[in-house]
Image (tube, helix red, strand yellow):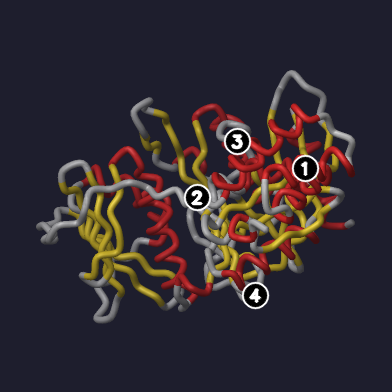
Amino acid sequence: MKTNLAPKHVRNINDTFLLWFKASNRYVIVSSSVWTLIGIYIKEDTQNSFVDELKTSLQIEDSKCQDLFDDISSFLIDSNTHTHTKTEPLNRIIIPKVNCVTFYKFKTTVIKVNFETPLIQSIIHPQIAHHQTAVTPNTFKEFHIFKNKDYLYLFRNNTYLNHYKTKDLHLLQGRFALELTNAIHKTIIDNWVATFHASTIANSKESIMIIGDSGNGKSTLSALLMADGFDLLADDFTPMYEDMNLYRYPSAISIKTGAFSLLESKIPGFHSLRTHTNGPKKVNLKYVPQNQRLDHKTSNFDCKTIVYVKFDENKRSELNPISVENILQTLIPDSWISPNEKHALKFMNWLSDITCYELSYSNNNFAIRKFKELFDH
């Protein structure tokens, strides 16, 4: 038996199987027929016994059995291989003098961020600028963000956290967001199950997670739903705690130029928001603050629904159920998921219970109406 290659946990979800490999913290969905073949591979001790079992029980021809053995071997080895982000070894790093010191207030928590330069400040500040405070407090949590050679460094209270290649600045943004989430909700990283590259809206009882590929209208739709009265719990960064609720994160919604004219008539004061230029392609963005204050009485909600959204002005608007498998293709690659086995089990159980939809839309009113129906369902 090849138990060393077997997934640590398996869940049957609507005739497919979700596998979790502990060594790599990787989630894979396979069909029931593929899982049957994997089960035989794990059970049999040798290649010959695997081939004999396939020929006998499944009537598969000999040459095909050999190919299946090789394919499953490669799949299981790859699934158990942990992929590390390669960085240079950390030598002794001295925190440099900074040019931009900014304070932010989140409920009763004050954060001081020391940005080495205005350019580095532009990586973080626009999303949380609406929380900036001019008051200099006596007590605060302090961060340093600076560049050394081709790496961006993150320190908390003068303690090194991590460093990232400048081309991977989204990893720095994600880690800072998680550290900020810890400070706001007064907890530690070990208590989070996951952080998703997703937006989340809520009513007074529950939340719906919105995912989609870049440029598919996820943020614009979130802003429209917020303007229509829904509570925007989080945009682009949605944290899930070990109680399996989704928690509030105070980042503003990033809106690209193409949606400016649409939102000017929907969101008061949109025209007066500052326009930022972002990235090597010089994309113009505005950042729309959330409609609920961070100290809103409800800081977290249960979530049983995920919607994959895709705006296409040339297609008919429709909302259809889809499989969890389709959702995971977008949800997993851009998310951080805790490697803790207890959290993996909770995450798999949650995936077994959620309902998934695909919203293709060209009409914004249609999209808003469908979200109202999902909440009322």
User: Quick check: 199 left or right of 12?
Assistant: left
Callout 2 amino acid: Thr
* Marking on residue 251: none
The answer to whether marks 3 and 4 mark residues whose Cβ atoms lie closer than 8 Å is no
Residue at image location 59% in from the left, 37% down from the top:
263
Q: Give how far apart the Cα atoms at labels 2 and 4 are.
A: 29 Å
Q: Which residue is mark 1?
A: 34
Secondary structure beneath label 3: loop
Sequence-first disc among 3 and 2: 2
Q: Nearer the viewer, mark 1 or mark 3?
A: 1
Q: Give how far apart the Cα atoms at labels 1 and 2 are.
A: 20 Å
Q: Nearer the viewer, residue 172 or 29?
A: 29
Sequence-first disc among 1 and 2: 1
- What percent of the width, then of the height, locates residue 173? 39, 51
Q: Which residue is mark 3?
A: 213
* Marking on residue 243: 4
The answer to whether marks 1 and 2 mark residues whose Cβ atoms lie closer than 8 Å is no
| Residue 70 visible here | yes
Q: Give how far apart the Cα atoms at labels 1 and 3 are.
A: 28 Å
The answer to whether marks 1 and 3 mark residues whose Cβ atoms lie closer than 8 Å is no
Residue at image location 59% in from the left, 42% down from the top:
219
- What percent of the width, then of the height, locates residue 168? 36, 42
Q: Which residue is mark 2?
A: 81
Q: Give how far apart the Cα atoms at labels 3 and 4 are.
A: 28 Å
